[in-house]
Image: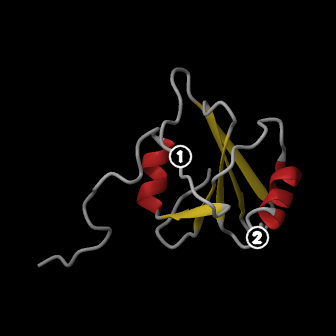
C-alpha cells in the first residue's frame, strides 16, 4: 500500500505517457523529462493518453511501487498544463486527484491552530 503523507513531495507529469510503460521506463522518464531522482522517495503521478487511468511510481527505500487507477467510467478531467515538465501537488490535492476530482478546488487550510 502506498501511503500519501503531508511531508511527501508529489510531482505530476504534465505530458501523458504510454500505458504500457513499466517501472524502469517510468523511472527513466522521471530522470530525463521531469529532471527528478526516482530514488528520492518522491511520488510521481502519470496520466494515460486517453485520461482514463493514472499511475503512481514511488521508491520506498527497498524497491519501487507502481500503482494504477483506471476509471470504469469517464476520465480524469483535471490535469495540469504548462511549459514545465511537472507540477507539484500537496497531499490533500493528490487525494482529490485520485478521486477523479479537481485538486484546485478551494478547501479548508491544510493546518490550522486548534483553540
> Quick check: 18 left or right of 88?
right
What residue did someone put label 2 on?
A: 35
Q: Residues within 10 Å of mark 2 (few under 14, many from 20)?
A: few
Residue 71: x and y, percent?
56, 28
> In which quadrant of the rendered view does residue 101 lie?
top left
Pointer 1 residue: 79
Residue 79 shown left or right of residue 110 in the figure:
right
Find out whether the residues at labels 1 and 2 contact each other: C-beta distance under 8 Å: no
Q: Nearer the viewer, residue 91 or 103?
A: 103
User: In the displayed image of the protein, which residue is found farthest to the left?
Assistant: 115
Picture coordinates of residue 108, whole percent (x, y): 25, 61
**In the displayed structure image, the side of residue 10 where residue 32 appears, left or right:** right
Helix, strand or loop at label 1? It is: loop
Q: CA distance from mark 1 to mark 2?
A: 20 Å
The residue depicted at 83 percent of the width and 42 percent of the height is 21
Q: Nearer the viewer, residue 55 or 115?
A: 55
Q: Is residue 7 above or below residue 11?
A: below
Q: Residue at x 87, y 51 (%)?
A: 25
| Residue 39 in the image, given as x and y percentages of width and height | 78, 70
Amino acid at each position: 500500500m502506498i501511503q500519501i503523507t503531508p511531508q511527501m513531495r508529489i510531482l505530476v507529469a504534465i505530458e501523458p505517457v504510454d500505458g504500457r510503460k513499466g517501472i524502469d521506463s517510468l523511472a527513466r522518464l522521471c530522470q530525463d523529462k521531469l529532471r527528478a531522482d526516482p530514488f528520492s522517495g518522491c511520488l510521481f503521478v502519470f496520466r494515460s493518453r486517453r485520461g482514463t487511468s493514472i499511475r503512481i511510481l514511488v521508491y520506498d527505500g527497498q524497491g519501487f511501487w507502481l500503482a494504477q487507477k483506471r476509471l470504469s467510467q469517464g476520465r480524469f478531467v483535471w490535469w495540469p498544463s504548462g511549459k514545465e515538465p511537472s507540477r507539484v501537488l500537496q497531499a490533500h490535492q493528490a487525494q482529490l486527484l485520485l478521486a477523479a476530482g479537481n485538486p484546485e478546488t478551494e478547501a479548508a487550510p491544510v493546518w490550522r491552530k486548534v483553540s
